[in-house]
Amino acid sequence: MNKKITSALISVFYKDGLETLVQTLHRSGVSIYTTGGTQQFIENLGIPCIAVESVTDYPSILGGRVKTLHPKIFGGILGRRQLEQDMSEMQQYGIPEIDLVIVDLYPFEETLAATDDEKLIIEKIDIGGPSMIRAAAKNFSDLTVLASKEDYSVLNDLLNAQDGSTTLEQRKQFAAKAFQVVMQYDIAISNYFNTETTVLRYGENPHQQARFTGNLQQVFTQLHGKELSYNNLTDTDAAFQLLKEFKDNSEGFFAIIKHTNVCGAALHHDLLQAWQLALAGDPESAFGGVLVCNGVITQEIAEAINEIFFEVLIADSFDAEALTILQQKKNRILLQNLHHNIDRPHEKSVLNGTLVQDEDQGNYSTWNEAGGRTSTEAERKDLIFANILCKHLKSNAIALVKNQQMTGKGCGQTSRIDALKQAIQKSKQFNFELAGAVLASDAFFPFDDCVKIAHAEGITAFIQPGGSIRDKDSMQYCQEQGLAMVITGMRHFKH
């Protein structure tokens, strides 16, 4: 049912884009109730408005903390127009009907990003705003509610098109958006109180402000070094995500992370050997990287690692002699893994919202030998290892492995062929022999071109998720050439 708007309560922090909507409401003869800075803004437009204080007969008190929290305001919002008793009580107590509520929230997250002053942060926890928004959204059958400046123009267009009224469906949609705004606001506040917020030196670049919200002490103990930066934390997270893949592996695992990509990795029963093999995979990219392993750093390993420059080293523990060696450089960050379960949804801010997805868990869902022969035991081990490494490379991604050592990788490329060529070039740069190596791809081969290029370099086994309408092209080539190919049924895109 259409509802004509005859009265509105407007109390907003952000005035951007409000002018046009207020002028539309004024032309439609809407009575406007307002507060503080919003009242001054509207009056400066030459538009009359009614101060909330004149309705409540109560001034704004406690430094503005209490001004709209009053029965005459909430009665006007929550009163049910179809109930005779509600309407009678509103008339009895002089409560005005409010048809439209335009309220936004204090900038809590913006304040949190700009300062660590607790008093300033606490004062940006809005009380009246969320209460009015929830009340208006609850009573959407009678009221229209706007909780974001992004909807000013939307409502303005609706009012112009519908003679100053809104439909029930439109009011319900605005209410749904309003509840979402309040929910996200409450989550931000809850996170502030339940986790520690650290203001970082800067973000990815010196001109960007940054902060970390969370409890790092649950994940690791920092034994030495400077404060972790934004980029350190990003790479450290990538290292921990990779390390989880090998938490139950009896062999020693060592990897080097650079800009969240694996640039060197190896499995070996001797952790020192695992380190040497990981470094040999790409000693050039290892400079300034994050190192991670699943064992104990001994004096011997520390002496070997100490020869290169790195930002962070993560290990299960460090021998006393190893710490003495590695602490020689004051800024070098040493982290002891506490094996805390950090499984959590992955979130990313995009456009005007947040993408949330489950963690990419698992290696393969099936093991379908679809080539010209079954993979050998050695190839199978390498294929499993390569597929995990590929999972932790930015798409498009290719990982090359031989004897449980990453010999080359291609990542972040706009074509799979480019990723493969990059991986082969890396292998040749550091003099790896690719004969008998295996290849993992994070997504399917839509043609047989990658398989042919890799085969020409001596690669004998492939692992990929499948799912292309032309899967048979690469499978047929492997069948004709006697190459192994495993179809996993599990894609590992990483954008």
Image: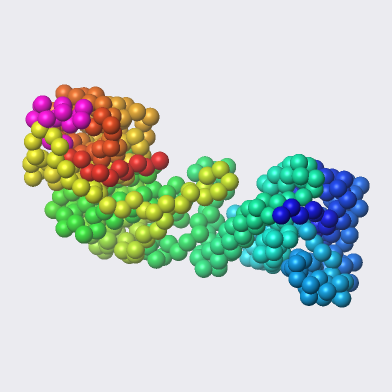
Q: Is residue 322 toward the left or the right of residue 164 in the image?
A: left
Could you tell me which residue is drawn at 90 percent across and 66 percent down?
A: 54
Could you tell me which residue is drawn at 81 percent across and 71 percent down?
A: 87
As displayed, is residue 490 above or below residue 424?
below
Residue 414 visible to an observer of this rendering: yes
Quarter holding residue 461: top left
Give how far across and how far down residue 424 sits, in percent.
Answer: 24, 28
- Most common SS among magenta residues: helix
Q: Is residue 174 toward the left or the right of residue 266 in the image?
A: right
Could you tell me which residue is drawn at 80 percent across and 54 percent down?
A: 5
Question: Where does the N terminus fall, quadrant-wise?
Answer: bottom right
Nearest the camera: 391 or 226? Answer: 391
- Residue 478 among magenta residues: yes
Residue 401 visible to an observer of this rendering: no
As displayed, is residue 337 above or below residue 349?
below
Give how far across and how far down residue 195 sits, in percent.
Answer: 50, 65
Nearest the camera: 328 or 407? Answer: 407
Give the residues drawn in magenta, as a range: 472-485
As displayed, is residue 418 above or below residue 138?
above
Quarter holding residue 493: top left
Nearest the camera: 103 or 239? Answer: 103
